Image (cartoon, rainbow, N blue to C red):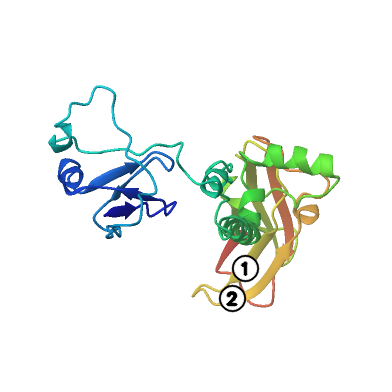
Amino acid sequence: MHTRCPRCQTRYPITAAQLRAGRGEARCEPCDIVFDALAGLEQTADNQPPLLSLLTRPDAKPDEETSTSPLFSFSADTRPATRRRKQGRSPRAVSPPPSAIPWNRLTLVLLLVLWSQYLYFEAESLLQNAALRPSLERVCAALRCTLTPYRDLRLIRAGDATLQKIRQADGGYEFRLALSNQSPLPQAFPRLQLILAEVDGKPIAERVFESSEYLEGQGQDPLMLTGKPYAVRLMLVAPGRGIGSYRFSLI
C-alpha cells in the first residue's frame, strides 16, 4: 500500500509498521510538511512497483521500523520534474485586503468633516479666546485675511453709574459711568444700552449709544486698551414724564 502527499500529490510506499511508528503521520521532504498518512492511504496492486522508495537513516538498525519515532521522511530527489518546477517558484507577496485603503480614506474624510463642523460652530468662541487670539492673528496676517474684532464683555468692568438732573437745564439729565478693560488684549468698545423707567419700573425711554457718542471729546482710542479707565458721559433730555429709575447694559 502507499500514501499520497496532499500538497504535491506524490505517492510514497508505506507499511503498517511504519504507520504505527509514525503514529499515522508522515513528512514530505519536497513540500516540508507533515501530513496525515492514513487520510491518503491506498492499496497498491501487487504488480505495480512503488513510485518512490523510503528514505532510511544511515544509522538505522534492522528492527528500527517498529520504533516509536513520531515521523518518517521521503527522499527529495525522487520528485517528478513537474513537481520540482512548481516547488521552485518564488512565493508572491501577499497584498493587503482591498478594503483597507478605502476604509482609511473614508476615516480621513469623516475626520475632516467633523473638524470642519467644529470650526463652523465654534469659530466665534475660538476667535474671542484671548490665549489663541495672538496665534490666529499671526496666521491671518500671513494669509492676508481679516479677523472679526476681539470682544469679551465679561472682561469689561463697569463702575458705579449715576443719573443726575441738571439744574440749569429744564428737564435735562447727565449720565456718568466708568469702564475699564480687564482683558489681557485690547478689544473693541462695547455699545451702551440705557433704559429710563418710571418709579414702578415701567420703561418710558430706551436708546443704544455707540462709543463715539458716550466718549465724545475724549480723543477715543481705536480699541479699548487694557487697564485704562474710560469715563462715559451722556447729556440726556428727559421725556415728558418723570424719571424714577434707570438701568444700563453693555452689548
Name the outermost residue toward the right.
Answer: 144
Can residue 160 be spotted in the picture?
A: no
Q: Quadrant of the C terminus?
A: bottom right
| Residue 122 in picture, x, y percent from top left | 60, 57
Horizontal side of residue 111 vs 39, given as left or right: right
Tell me the residue at 28%/44% (across/down). 26
Element assignment for label 2: strand
Identify the mark at residue 132; answer none if there is no mark: none
Q: Nearer the viewer, residue 220 or 107?
A: 107
- Name the residue tied to disc 1: 195
Q: Nearer the viewer, residue 234 or 122?
A: 122
- Name the residue tied to disc 2: 203
Tell me the residue at 61%/45% (across/down). 129
Can residue 69 be spotted in the picture?
A: yes
| Residue 193 in picture, x, y percent from top left | 66, 63
Q: Nearer the viewer, residue 136 or 29?
A: 29
Element assignment for label 1: strand
Mark 2: few, some, or many residues within 10 Å (few <14, many ≥20)? some
| Residue 224 in picture, x, y percent from top left | 72, 42
Looking at the picture, which amino acid does disc 1 mark? Answer: Ile
Q: CA distance from mark 1 to mark 2?
A: 7 Å
Tell me the residue at 38%/55% (across/down). 6
Looking at the picture, which amino acid does disc 2 mark? Answer: Pro
Tell me the residue at 55%/69% (across/down). 244
Q: Earlier in the sequence, mark 1 or mark 2?
A: 1
Q: Is residue 170 above or below residue 135?
A: below
Q: Badges 1 and 2: C-beta atoms under 8 Å apart?
A: yes
Q: Quadrant of the N terminus?
A: bottom left
| Residue 211 in picture, x, y percent from top left | 76, 53
Mark 1: few, some, or many residues within 10 Å (few <14, many ≥20)? some
